[in-house]
Amino acid sequence: MQVLVAHWKVVALLTGLVVFATWASSRKAIPRYQSRATIQVSSKKQAMTPLEAMRMDEMAIQTDPVLSEALVLSTQALALRIVDALGLRLKVDNPQFSRAAWLYDAQVVDSVVDSRTRPDSFVLEQKDTGYELRSAARGTLVAAGAYDVPAVGPGFSFRVREYRGERRRVRLSIDPRLAAGNKVRGGIGFAVQPTTNLVNVTFTGTDPSMVPEILNEALRALQRHGQDAIREVAERRLQYVGERAEDARARYIASLTRVQAYKESQGTTDLSAEESALINSIQNSDREKERLLVDLATLEGIVGPATEVTIETLNRMASVADIADNTAMTFQLQNLLRLFDDRRTLVAGALGLREGNPQIQALDQRITQAAQALRDAANATVRGMQANIASLDRNIASLRARLQTYPGKQTQFAQLML
């Protein structure tokens, strides 16, 4: 107390400086806003499924299909979709102003505005009768008109929010596309509710009017991503099956023609039970071979030496039925999903680690190694499928050879049926 009394002026001065510094920094702090939503991911994952009953069907529980779908929210491709849909490259430079209070229906054409450069800034002035948009650097008039006339600039357009009152101005600029996408990625967060297929999704930002819009667009983009992935797999399968079906149809019509001609000439219509069993075995082997060929073509189109392994890649693998019983593939898929989730957690939010951080670089290295391990497992699966197809070919040839040993008209009739 004697020290405090003796130096009370110093103590009072330091206390005042700390209080003033705290007050000044709090005034300069930019408030942040957060929107939240809970979504349900369509999945066959069951919370109480017995361990012995678990199977991987469409990215089964071992690789957590809910987490796999939710991780799409952290991808750059989805962030760029949001940026393009909402015109987020066009922004209000003063973070204390809400963009929605000044403009709406913003669009930026990337082919006109180079995504790697920062174009000129602009000054938007609202007046009682209309608006004016000028170049901030040169002061030249870019666009002007009534509030119902869109403001069109070099590579962008937007509509000005109607305003009645004294003149007011705000500075606008255009972010590079990747930079705008990284801002969106940094604001998106999610957490999977344990033992459910529910995902809590959040978006945090400085513009209270845009935060819920961005969150809603993120959920719409996630829904479209799932629809596009299903459509892509279905179209690829349909194309392949269609080609095979057309070939099978031609062979079937030729067989029917030969059978009809033979029946008319010989009057033979019945087969023995043993011959019928052989024919059924050949037909079953043919069907299994066709299924393997479809899955083989799908898997070869997903993972190649030059193909980047992403969350989308893992989701596309869900269409390959042979992965269900492949321990090596399911392990690698689970490992990659966990690494992607760890990386997303580290870089999420404003306080997340940046791309150049050594911890992120080390994790990226682990992801690269895991992706290579997945390619190796996929190549091994491809070789196994090719071996199975070759084995089926040998089995079919053997069955056909046995069928040729049966004498008489019935055998010839059976040969014509194949």
Image (cartoon, grey):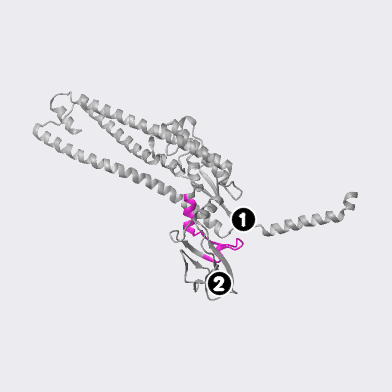
In the picture, measured across the screen, residue 312 lies left or right of residue 250, that is: right
* The C terminus, quarter of image: top left
Q: Is residue 297 above or below residue 281?
A: below
Q: Position of residue 86 (x, y in %)?
A: 49, 59
405 vs 146, nearest the viewer: 146
Rendered image: mark on residue 75: none
Residue occupied by mark 1:
32
Does the magenta segment cover residue 259? Answer: no
Q: Secondary structure at mark 2?
A: strand
Question: Can residue 228 be seen here?
Answer: yes
174 vs 128, nearest the viewer: 174
Q: Nearer the viewer, mark 1 or mark 2?
A: 2
Please name the residue shown 34% across and 46% down the image: 235
Residue occupied by mark 2:
126
Q: Secondary structure at mark 1?
A: loop
In the picture, measured across the screen, residue 374 lies left or right of residue 296, that is: right
Q: Position of residue 247 (x, y in %)?
A: 23, 40
Please name the residue shown 47% across and 40% down the image: 65
Please name the residue shown 54% across and 56% down the image: 212
Q: Which residues make up the magenta segment?
A: 77-103
Q: Disc 1 to disc 2, how far (Cα)?
A: 26 Å
Q: Amino acid at mark 2?
A: Gln
175 vs 258, nearest the viewer: 175
